[in-house]
Image (cartoon, helix red, strand yellow):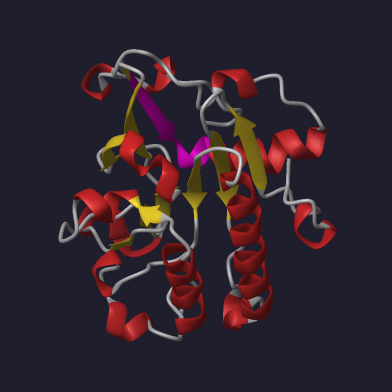
Amino acid sequence: YGLGIEEHDQEGRLICAEYDHFFYVTTYVPNSGSGLHRLEYRARWDNDLLNFIKNKEKEKPVFLCGDLNVAHQPIDLKNPKSNFNKTPGYTQTEIDGMSNFIKNGFTDTFRHFYPDEIKYSWWSYRFNSRAKNIGWRLDYFLSSENGLDMVKDAFILNDVMGSDHCPVGIKLNWIMKYIVLVLLQFKLLFLLAQQLDNNGFENWENIGTPTEEPIDWSSTKTSDTPSLNGF
């Protein structure tokens, strides 16, 4: 758990699960905060996270998922001009941080398959933003270069309710098996904020575990997913 750096790990923002053939890293990247007061810290986080996953990549492929708290391109948010260098998640520093992941061999899997599709994963609770689809794409699955050939598809399930974020995921075609890894952002936040604080991970084995069969989301109900206190 964590990056191995006290400055970051005291906030409980990362879990790395090792599978036989890849690492699955899930993270909640720091928001730069009101007035961008944490932007400098955020830049350090991005650099340290990149170093962490590059070291993991030396052993086996890496899939990084989570709320990366950045809209990488203008297509990734509804109002790019009015937010640029003013709003956390769309400053040049944060954009450059994401670009650095790409330059170092990691692929934004959704843009890899859908370079021109407009789809968001987060909407403010204010101003009826979700109904108006005034959103941002803040949640990603990044694949290391040595894992990209395992990725069959990427998706954003923006019709799934339950949070200001929606699930994103990838489908892996691996050793003749069809695997779906899904990030449910509202569950990720609870894991990192509550499970780490309690030093207990009793439910971790039920979250993000690969299955051999595709999940039929059209018939999935909220009660079918791992439960959260207060949800």
Prevailing secondary structure of the magenta residues? strand
Q: Nearer the viewer, residue 110 or 128?
A: 110
Work out which quarter of the rendered image holds the N terminus and state it: top right
Q: Give the mark count.
A: 0
Q: Residue at x 38, y 67 (%)?
A: 71
Q: Residue furthest left?
A: 116
- Placement of 35 over or under 65, stated as above or below: below
Name the spot of residue 198 as percent of width and height, x first: 80, 33
Describe residue 198's horizontal placement relative to residue 163 as left or right.
Answer: right
Observer able to see residue 173: yes
| Span highlighted in magenta in the image | 178-187
- Placement of 96 over or under 172, stated as above or below: below
Q: Nearer the viewer, residue 24 or 74?
A: 24
Name the spot of residue 74 as percent of width and height, x first: 27, 74
Q: Residue at x 62, y 68 (%)?
A: 47
- Placement of 81 over or under 23, stated as above or below: below
Describe residue 80's horizontal placement relative to residue 85 as left or right.
Answer: left
Can residue 186 be found in the magenta stretch? yes
Name the spot of residue 100 as percent of width and height, x first: 48, 70
* Residue 176 lies in quadrant: top left
Name the spot of residue 6 as percent of width and height, x first: 84, 57
Observer able to see residue 164: no
* Residue 155 lies in quadrant: top left
Describe residue 95's horizontal placement relative to residue 23 as left or right.
Answer: left
* Residue 128 lies in quadrant: bottom left
Can residue 140 be found in the magenta stretch? no
Q: Residue at x 73, y 47 (%)?
A: 2
